[in-house]
Amino acid sequence: MAAHAVFVGTDDLAYVHAHAMSAGAANAAHGSHGSAHDPAGAVSAQMMLHATPPHAGRYALWIQFMADGEIRTVPFVVDVAPGA
């Protein structure tokens, strides 16, 4: 995969792993049943990620991708609102 993300719940360690895809591939997939994942290679500047956390709350999030021949990891903190 060109990129992937890991969400970990800060309260209970709930875990979600998702693969990113280019925005163009994601738009094409919305009307099809085929896979829209990009093969490993160049990472598009326009990526989409669809993930459903198991519940509302705070999640530590890491996005990982290849750049300049190195694996890059970028951390975030995400608050998921109830009903989101």
Image (cartoon, helix red, strand yellow):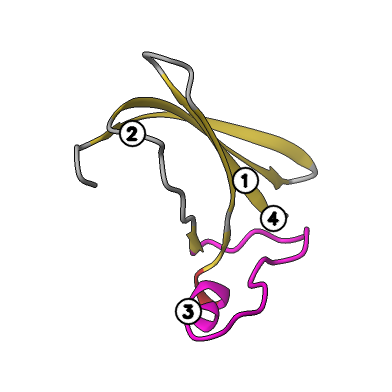
Q: Which residues are magenta?
A: 25-46
Question: What residue did someone put label 2 on?
Answer: 55
Q: Is residue 38 magenta?
A: yes
Which residue, given by chain and number where applicable, does mark 4 sit on?
A: 2
Query: For the residue labelled by badge 2, is the local secondary structure a helix, a strand or a loop?
Result: loop
Tags 4 and 1 touching, CB below 8 Å = no
Q: Is residue 35 above or below residue 44?
A: below
Q: CA distance from mark 2 to mark 1?
A: 20 Å
Left or right relative to 49: residue 37: right
Q: Mark 1 and mark 2 in contact (Cβ < 8 Å)?
A: no
Question: What amino acid is found at the position of numbered circle 1 in the picture?
Answer: His
Q: Quadrant of residue 69?
A: top right
Disc 2 versus disc 1: nearer the observer: 2
- Characterize the local packing of mark 4: few (<14), some (14-19) or many (20 or more) Cα atoms within 10 angstroms: many
With 29 as the anchor, is 78 left or right in this view? left
Label of residue 65 in the image: none
Q: Position of residue 11 (x, y in %)?
A: 36, 13
Compare marks 3 and 2 and give the one earlier in the sequence. Answer: 3
Disc nearer the start of the sequence (4/2): 4
Earlier residue among tags 1 and 3: 1
Q: Which residue position is annotated with label 3?
A: 30
Q: Position of residue 3 (x, y in %)?
A: 64, 50
Which residue matches tag 1?
Answer: 4
Q: Residue at x 50, y 70 (%)?
A: 23
Question: How far is mark 3 from mark 4, CA to CA?
Answer: 19 Å
Residue drawn at 67 percent across, 72 percent down: 35
Number of numbered discs overlaid on the protein picture:
4
Q: Amino acid at mark 2?
A: His
Q: Residue furthest top?
A: 11
Q: Amino acid at mark 3?
A: His
Mark 3–mark 2 Cα distance, whole angstroms, equals 24 Å
Q: Secondary structure at mark 1?
A: strand
